[in-house]
Amino acid sequence: MTQQPQTQAVRPQTTYTKGDMVLFRDAERFWLGLPRHTFVGRVERSWTSVHNGKRLYDLTELSGNRHRAGIDPGYMRLLPPADAMHDIDTAPLSEPDTGAMTPAAVAWLRRHLAQDSSTLPEVR
């Protein structure tokens, strides 16, 4: 019996910039079955390793404000602002019941109305 070669999905190389929000997975902790292997971080800087020429990143782990250095971008995924803001961007503003909106959308709307009740954002 011949084995089929395994294929891996090839991800395009992503370059991260300072301030980007990313999801990071600590591969060693993940494969060992240890807890706290995945976290949200903010990119602080990028640099090139003198040992292998590979681009690495320093992150701040947001849940504990912990610095993580030399992160391999292969274990990082960008957390796009559009995804974080989707519930606000798609909030059913025409609904009379705010229960139809997520708590984040209601909080944003209340904050905006408190700041300037004369203008509302454009509905998309």
Image (cartoon, grey):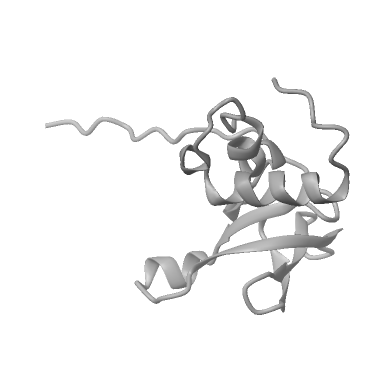
Frontmost residue, 56 versus 77: 77
**Residue found 61% across the figure and 36% down from its top:** 86
User: How far from the left and from the top, in percent, is residue 75?
Assistant: 58, 55
User: How far from the left and from the top, in percent, is residue 2?
Assistant: 18, 31
**Residue found 78% across the figure and 65% down from its top:** 51
In the depicted structure, whether residue 54 falls above or below residue 27: above
Residue 48 is at least partly visible in this image: no
Frontmost residue, 42 versus 119: 119
User: How far from the left and from the top, in percent, is residue 52?
Assistant: 75, 59
Quadrant for the N terminus, please: top left
In the depicted structure, whether residue 120 falls above or below residue 36: above
Residue 29 is at least partly visible in this image: yes
Relative to 78, is 113 on the left or the right?
right
- Locate residue 60: give its quadrant: bottom right
**Residue found 44% across the figure and 36% down from its top:** 8
Residue placed furthest toward the left: 1
Frontmost residue, 27 versus 100: 100
Relative to 82, is 87 on the left or the right?
left
**Residue found 48% across the figure and 69% down from its top:** 37
User: How far from the left and from the top, in percent, is residue 48?
Assistant: 84, 58
Count of numbered marks: 0
Quadrant for the C terminus, please: top right
